[in-house]
Amino acid sequence: MTRTVEINSLKSLVHSLEDAIEQKDKSQRHLNYIANHDVLTGLRNRYAFKKYIEKYFADDQCQLKYDLKLFLVDLTRFKNINDTLGHDMGDCVLKSVVIKLKDNLPDEVTIYRLGGDEFAVILQDENGASSVSEKMVLDELLDIFKRKYRVKGGRIRIGASIGICSAPKDANSSQELIQRADIAMYEAKRNGRLTEYKYFDSCLERELKEKKIIEQSILDMIQTKDFDVYFQPKLDAITEEITGIEALLRVTDATGQALSAIKVIQVAEENNLIALFGDIVIEKSFQFLRQLKQESEADINLALNISSLQIRDGFIEKIETCLNESGLSFADITFEITESLLIDRPEFVRERLSYLHSKGVGISIDDFGTGYSSLSYLHNYPFGELKIDRSFISEIENNDTKKKIVIGIIQLAHAIDLTVVAEGVETQAQYKFLKSVNCDYVQGHLFYPALPAEQMLEVIKSQSCPPKSISAKSISV
């Protein structure tokens, strides 16, 4: 009897141990699943993604086995959905997107949710055996993001920016593969379209590195205010008298190498630094104009190029403060703006420009002819001046079409009481033609390049000398 009890106790103990082991295995499998999968969508997560990529590159023979294609997908407009409709709606959209991805992408690919609205799709082709091509996957992705999604009774359009990178062709490590796919995706996003894709290219990487250098230079300059503002004169086309100066950036990096002002402004805008940067340019320009007025009798107007991101709440107050501190008036300055500013926030911009115009600020439309050149801009905004882009002035002496365009622009501007400035005048033939067709003002290297403040001051002081006597070549810049 005692032996039977002992045997039953042992059996019970064995069963208990088996149950415990099974329960532990279940718990371990559950923990492994949680560790490798996204809770919301059920897709493999970032941890699983990185583990797979690292395993691919850890295999010394991976290059001989198969190629790996990585599609990095970032949803566009998703933040707007969260902000306007709430995170619950955002979760519903994500689930709908995942269903489309699962239903339409071939079984040969693996889909990962990396977090937020970012996904990765991996296509691997072991020994060239897969019948699914990179193009087939891309076409499916593009088709998926052309559709509208029905969510809670509504229809939502959502797009995607897709960056594509291949291993081992484009990358030799997991970090390189991910970074370079991200570079391609960033470039796709930068195009501003609802859905766009880009393949990685070494040129993109070089451009990104250059932008990082420029961004750091901008941050340093904002901190120290250690950069130059140059000034290029604007001359009366008939008398050749300097009537205005345009403030222009001249920027160098930490090594003293000159940086493209256009690229500096572009990077500053992309990183939301243009307002801070622009404020310093305005302060420096106003300080110089004050000095110029104190040390000469010239009545010179200062032109400032304004980015769409500078026209913000507080911009007018900033201008008024700077004018008061420098002892200048609204009539001393002109703002040059491009069509992109008018397209981005038309009503907001119109209201502020109209206020500044009412105070006496000159408003000039810059680079006219390079965008849509909509006549409605000339009618609906308080412009007093139009600047013909230098691309129309270049080689105009040998191009009848350009001549006709310039004549048409000048006649149109004069018909609605706008004065006209021709930019980029470099030859006597160009200048002679512009005078003959009644262009009001000219600007360019034929007369002066952009000059540092000290040299610009000396030029203004010597206004009585013919401007042509100081050529671009004779001035050290």
Image: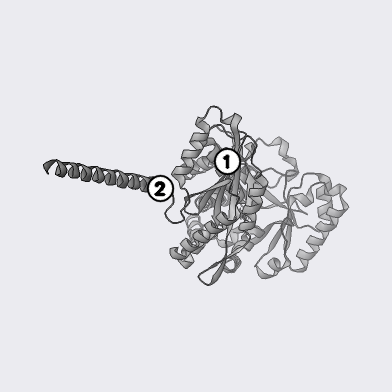
Residue positioned most to the front: 1
Relative horizontal placement of residue 150, taking residue 235 as reference (left or right): left
Q: Where 26 sits versus 474, above or below? A: below
Q: Residue at x 63, y 36 (%)?
A: 202
Closer-to-camera residue (261/371): 371
- The residue depicted at 48 percent of the width and 45 percent of the height is 222
Which residue carries the number 2 mark?
33
Query: Dot 1, how many residues are within 10 Å of its Cα: few (below 14), some (14-19), or many (20+)?
Result: some
Please give the residue where the numbered disc 1 appears in the rendered image: 208
Element type at mark 1: helix
Q: Could you classify mark 2 by the number of other residues whose Cα lies within 10 Å: few (under 14), some (14-19), or many (20 or more)?
A: some
The quarter of the picture where residue 209 lies is: top right
Instruction: Indicate the position of residue 409 as horizontal and vertical percent values.
Output: 78, 61
Q: Amino acid at mark 1?
A: Leu
Q: Which mark is residue 355?
A: none
Compared across the picture, whether 288 is left or right of 381 comes to: left
Residue shown at 46% from the left, 43% from the top: 48
Residue 285 visible within the image: no
Corner quadrant of residue 195: bottom right
